[in-house]
Image (spheres, rainbow, N blue to C red):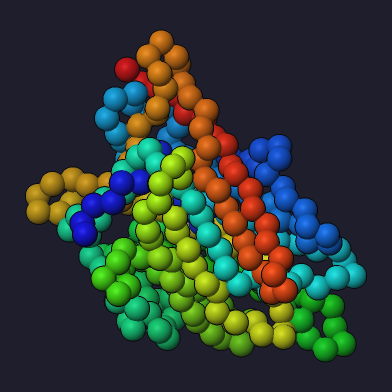
């Protein structure tokens, strides 16, 4: 499968380009999860589509006296309007990234690079206060078991050098959200810490077979006579150890050209 219909704003896990809107903070007991997301540019054609970059991120916090539960599954359901094109784009095999440093990952799969972001964790050491640890995240176009996928490679140095790869399966859905991206997180921190943040930005313009393509493109679904539109950009769902689940819908707007 070479082309996949995508939302007006394909998700990214990236440093968000806009602030978190009211209502995009979810609370479950002592657990607090904030969500962010953006489209760039926001001015898009009313008819047809144009290249875009999109971002989605999450921050996980808890009360100072509490330890946050382990994040085990992340699901991003994306609005059905838009286009996601991998025609002629290089594919990065999973075994090339496991294990590897950031430099090795980029050297082996640069042609498949479609985004970047950040992975954050809180490290817990006996008898000490927790301290933050983070690793650069790079996203690569891939296929897993014959299906479209995004491989998010993370390499960190604390508490010890380590790399791992998040596999985001890409599948179609129906209704408002036409595409679902799902990843089950590895137990990278075990009892020594917990995931505190994840972000990524996706977007790439490339040439294949003499033609220009955009990894993510979209139009603004504004009705005739209206200058723009407000739409449900994405629904983010986080599942934690112990069965706790947090979900939030991110609403965004666009301006129509033409």
Q: Is residue 104 left or right of residue 237?
A: left
Can you name the residue that lies furthest to the top here?
A: 225
Give how far across and how far down residue 88 sits, in percent. 17, 58
Q: Is residue 108 left or right of residue 245?
A: left
Residue 32 lies, with reference to residue 92, above or below; the image says: above
- Say which quadrant the C terminus sits in: top left
Q: Nearer the viewer, residue 140 or 30?
A: 30
Q: Residue at x 46, y 21 (%)?
A: 228
Q: Residue at x 79, y 76 (%)?
A: 130
Give how far across and how far down residue 184 sits, in percent. 52, 72
Can you name the residue that lies furthest to the right here?
A: 65
Give how far across and how far down residue 244 sits, in percent. 71, 65
Q: Residue at x 18, y 45 (%)?
A: 212
Residue 167 lies, with reference to residue 76, above or below; the image says: below
Q: Residue at x 71, y 79 (%)?
A: 193
Residue 108 lies, with reference to residue 9, above or below; the image says: below
Q: Is residue 131 left or right of residue 235?
A: right
């Amino acid at each position: 499968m070479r082309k996949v219909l995508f939302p007006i704003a394909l998700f990214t896990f990236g440093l968000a380009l806009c602030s978190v809107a009211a209502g995009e903070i979810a609370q479950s007991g002592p657990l607090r999860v904030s969500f962010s997301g953006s489209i760039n540019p926001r001015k898009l054609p009313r008819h047809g589509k144009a290249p875009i970059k999109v971002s989605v991120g999450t921050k996980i916090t808890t009360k100072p006296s509490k330890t946050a539960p382990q994040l085990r599954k992340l699901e991003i359901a994306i609005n059905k309007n838009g286009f996601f094109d991998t025609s002629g784009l290089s594919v990065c095999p999973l075994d090339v990234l496991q294990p590897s440093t950031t430099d090795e990952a980029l050297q082996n799969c640069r042609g498949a690079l479609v985004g970047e972001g950040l992975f954050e964790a809180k490290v817990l050491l006996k008898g000490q206060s927790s301290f933050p640890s983070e690793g650069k995240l790079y996203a690569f176009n891939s296929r897993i078991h014959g299906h479209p996928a995004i491989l998010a490679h993370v390499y960190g140095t604390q508490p010890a050098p380590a790399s791992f790869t998040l596999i985001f399966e890409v599948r179609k859905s129906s209704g408002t959200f036409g595409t679902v991206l799902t990843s089950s997180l590895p137990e990278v921190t075990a009892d020594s810490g917990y995931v505190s943040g994840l972000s990524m930005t996706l977007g790439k313009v490339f040439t294949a077979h003499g033609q220009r393509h955009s990894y993510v493109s979209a139009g603004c679904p504004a009705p005739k006579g209206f200058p723009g539109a407000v739409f449900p950009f994405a629904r983010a769902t986080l599942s934690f150890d112990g069965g706790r689940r947090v979900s939030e819908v991110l609403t965004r707007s666009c301006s129509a050209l033409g």
